Image (cartoon, helix red, strand yellow):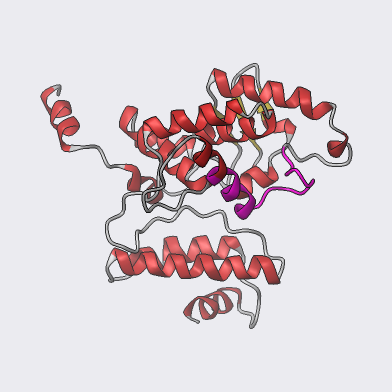
Amino acid sequence: MRYDAWVWDREDRYTVSPTPEHATTFIEENVAYRGVANSTKGKVEEALARYHDWLNRTHRVDEWGHDQIFNSSGGDAPRDFLTRRERRQLREAALATGDWREASIILTCLDAALRPVEVRRARPGWVNVANELLRIPRSESSKNEQDWRTSLTTRSSNALDEWLDVRADDDAYDETDALWLTRVGTRYSSRSLSRLVKRLCSDAGIDPAGRTLTLYSLRHSTGTYLTAERDLAATKAQLRHKSAKTTLKYDQVPPNQRRDALDNI
């Protein structure tokens, strides 16, 4: 496989296990600049994601918390994201469960656009209710690049505050610093988070309409609408992108909005 050969050449060692950092660098410094169609680049990304999922399950390599940059079906707009109405429906369905664990996960992910690996690593120390922020240390962020300060709405901060009170009285958390555990006492994975999102979408009456709705659907919707409301700089900061190239896929402002902007300058 070209990717394995690239890793071995980069590390000057044979049979070294690729890491998530290798995968991200391979996409951003190699695949992104190939003289092929973006749909082809998207297929490479998807194959690499499947490969790293296998490495995670069989070789104990960390999960690859990656936002797909290129669309394998052509065009680079994020796929499978929630509409504004669906975001509201999902939020209401999560709150209607009366389960502050689930509600706080969904509301936090709608604001902070957390990746599955970030939900898995999240700790109570990340939460700053008073200032309505998540503070993600460099050592615990998915890219390990820098400390992040991610904004939260008041409603999400309140949900986290309620959850922290419930968590403090739950014996399941006596021996762990995980912010959230599943009902069976394990840390969340991409699969368990996808099941949660699909169940709550069903409860909310959200029709998938051919989409694959996962935690990334929440993240992609946050990026899409934050870009429309603010700008790419705000989206890059909120979604914690290392590369501006990754943020460009959210620049899908409709022509009429662009026209209005031109009229105003």
- What is the residue that sits farthest to the left in this orientation? 263
- Quadrant occupied by the C terminus: top left
Location of residue 9 with respect to 102 vertically, above or below: below
88 lies left or right of 104: left
- Residue located 15% across and 26% down the image: 260
7 lies left or right of 87: right
- Residue located 44% across and 65% down the image: 45
Q: Can the viewer see residue 128?
A: yes
Q: Position of residue 93 (x, y in %)?
A: 54, 30
Q: Position of residue 29 (x, y in %)?
A: 43, 63
**Which image quarter: residue 95?**
top right
Q: How many marks?
A: 0
Q: Position of residue 168 (x, y in %)?
A: 82, 27
Does the magenta run of residues contain 181? yes
- Residue located 56% across and 54% down the image: 65
Q: Nearer the viewer, residue 172 or 183?
A: 183
98 lies left or right of 232: right
- Residue located 58% across and 58% down the image: 64
Magenta region, residue range: 180-198
Does the magenta run of residues contain 117? no
